[in-house]
Each structure stands twice: as C-alpha cells, then as structure tokens.
Image (tube, grey):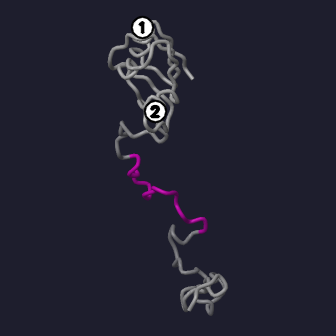
Amino acid sequence: MTINLQTLKPNAGARRRKTRKGRGIAAGQGASCGFGMRGQKSRSGRPTRPGFEGGQMPLYRRLPKLKHFELVNPKHFTVINVGQLAELAAGSSVNLQSLEEAGIVTSPKHPLKVLGNGDLSVKLSVEAAGFTASARAKIEAAGGSCELI
C-alpha cells in the first residue's frame, strides 16, 4: 500500500468528537460540566494564575534570588591575542578577512575582538569590534592604530 496525501487518514478511534459541555444530561456533561458542585475549581473564570498556592507564599517567592544566571543572548566574539599579530608584516591593515587569509583565524563566525596577551613590536592598523585596554595600549605603544568597527 502506497501512502499519498490523498490516502492519509487517522487510525480508527484516534479522533474522538469534542464533548459538548452544559447541554443537558444526555450529552454526558450537563449542568456542572464535570467540575463538581462547589469550590474554587468549579467557578467560572476558575483557573488561578500559574504558581498560585491557595494564598500560601508561593515557591517562586520563597526561594532566594540567585545570582550568576547565564545570559540569554550573550555576545560572541572571534578572539585573537596581540602576540599572534606579531607575525604580520609591518604597516599592514589587520581585520577579520586579512587574518583569515593569513591563516591565523580559521572560522570567523563572529566579530573580531583583540585581547592583550603577548607582545607586539610591529606597527599595525587594526580594525576590530572590540579591544581590551591592555591590547589597545600595546598596539598604540608599537606605533599602530586601533579602529572600532
């Protein structure tokens, strides 16, 4: 048997008719519609808000407010250290594309950020989305320039 969009149908007994509540005894859910006689759960507009515990102090308010939750939308960077830039030719312009061509960065998914680990003695003009304070100081001390993109 081949299955086509035209021949698709649910299994026998898989789809039941919706119960029509409050339509008399014969319908099976007459009068109180299966919610019982009295009480909060039988009233109209009955569902209490999520987390409600009948007036008791709810769990989300009893627990301490914890720190160190992870960021929902963290910023990701392609990270490189100043020491890795020392191999490049003097006076060259450094950006994400030139680093990829030089083979220093292999998979540039995110914007470039320069960190300050290592030493630099070559004058470079670096274009990046971010610099640490020590990286900026080392690049400028070598006579180079830092440009934020």
Residue 52 within the segment the image draws in magenta: yes
N-terminal-most mark, 1 or 2: 2
Q: Which amino acid does label 1 sit on?
A: Ala
Query: For the residues carrying marks 1 and 2, which lies nearer the camera in this image?
Result: 1
Kindly identify the residue that appears in the image at 51 percent across and 67 percent down.
Answer: 40
Seen in the image, is 51 located left or right of residue 5? left
Which mark, by number, is residue 62?
Answer: none
Q: In which quadrant of the rendered view does residue 135 lie?
A: top left
The correct choice, above or below, for 86 with respect to 12 in the image is: above
Residue 7 is situated, as x and y percent measured from the top left of the image, at 63, 88
Q: What element carries label 1?
A: loop
* Residue nearest the viewer, comparing 112 with 55: 112
What is the residue that sits farthest to the left in this orientation? 118
Q: Which mark is residue 142?
A: 1
Instruction: Confirm or deny contact between disc 1 and disc 2 (CB under 8 A).
Output: no
Residue 77: image tag: 2
Amino acid carrying label 2: it is Phe
Element at badge 2?
Answer: loop
Mark 2 is surrounded, within 10 Å at the Cα level, by few (under 14), some (14 to 19) or many (20 or more) other residues, namely some
Placement of the C terminus among the 4 image quadrants: top right
Residue 117 locus on image (x, y percent):
33, 20
Q: Which span is picked out in magenta?
A: 44-61
Q: Which residue is drawn at 41% across and 30% down?
A: 104
Q: Which of 64 and 71 is in front in this view?
A: 71
Tell me residue 16's x, y (percent): 58, 86
Frontmost residue, 30 versus 50 = 50
Q: In this view, does 121 lie above or below 11?
A: above
Magenta stretch, overall SS: loop
As measured in the structure, the alpha-carbon distance from the residue carrying label 1 to the one carrying label 2 is: 24 Å
What is the x, y in percent for residue 84? 37, 23
* Near-viewer residue (1 or 92): 92
